[in-house]
Amino acid sequence: MSFVRNFEPEGRHLHGGYRSTYDHANYAKYDAVPASLKRRKYAAPAWEDSQMYYLPYTVQNNFSSANFQAPPTRSNADTSTSASLQLDWSIFEDDKPSFMSRDEIDRYSPSRKDGIDVRHETHLRYSYCAYLQNLGMRLELPQTTIGTAMVLCHRFFVRRSHACHDRFLIATAALFLAAKSEESPRPLNNVLRASSEILHKQDFTMLSYLFPIDWFEQYRERLFEAEQLILTTLNFELNVQHPYAPLTSVLNKLGLSKTILVNLALNLVSEGLRSSLWLQFKPEHIAAGAAYLAAKFLNMDLAADRNIWQEFQTTPSILQDVSQQLLELF
């Protein structure tokens, strides 16, 4: 298997951030809802299983707009049985980024309370990342902006359950926010049109004939609600640091800036966006793990330079952990 693709540095467009073998058209491949979830509204968009138009739940189910921003109320029994699945979310309210272990992310995800196991949630994460990559490419956004949107979604769903929120709507709003925060904004109507075409697999001009006359305005309102929900859930913290800069900086110091190692390591970083690594490690740690794994693929011995891992400010255990999680993506 070849892992090498053409990588374009930050600020330029990378259209090969994911393996070409990934089927971007089938985002809902893993959306089968467990029987235990049939008691509640599951966050599968209507386009996945019917010809219903993509409207806010406020329209489809006659809910008030406030209901969109809060998960369904659980019974006392549900609350008591899930007491062990609690985490002190105040750690995310500091100015400096806080990190969780992989075990904490897997065990304390709000989706566990709704019957979504780790494997299912992983597939849901992959699906919204593939969708974001497709949407970002259509909007000609830099890869760093697309990556920021993915990380914002990861941060959102480590606090909110997949069973209560439409991940594709959240992803669309996250990309709209990321484009603004990364100083590469796109007009809202352009984002909505492109996302509608991807979700419905129809040219935008055809959608006006298929859906009610005000469907686009309702979709716009729903995205505004999702944008506000993301901001409040993340405490208005949209800053995301990526490993691209520390990776290229350290390898440049070693005289490896124009080698296949850099290209492969950068692509491994882009692949890693599908994982929860950004919730677990600092950017330089992810960069080190990507460089370490790339060197192993190429049978290169980076350990010959004893200062390289010190440059990344990392340890052998972190190297092993990051590289192993990257390897699991293939």
Image: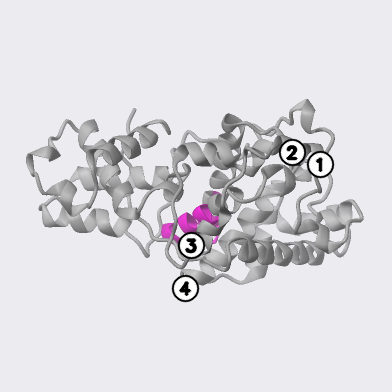
Magenta includes 4? no
Q: Quadrant of residue 43?
A: top right
**Residue linked to disc 1:** 76
Question: Which of marks 4 and 1 precedes in the sequence?
Answer: 1
> Where 30 sits versus 224, above or below?
above
Residue depth check, mark 1 versus mark 4: number of the one nearer the observer: 1
- Secondary element under disc 1, as helix, strand or loop, is helix
The segment highlighted magenta reads 134-152
In the rendered structure, find residue 80 and report the number of the disc placed on it.
Answer: 2
Question: Dot 3 corresponds to which residue?
Answer: 141
- Residue 183's label in the rendered image is 4
Tag 4 near tag 2, CB within 8 Å:
no
Q: CA distance from mark 3 to mark 1?
A: 45 Å
Q: Nearer the viewer, mark 4 or mark 2?
A: 2
Task: Assign the N terminus to one quadrant of the image.
Answer: top left
- Quick check: marks 2 and 1 in contact, CB under 8 Å? yes
Q: Residues within 10 Å of mark 3 (few under 14, many from 20)?
A: many
Identify the secondary structure beneath mark 3. Answer: loop
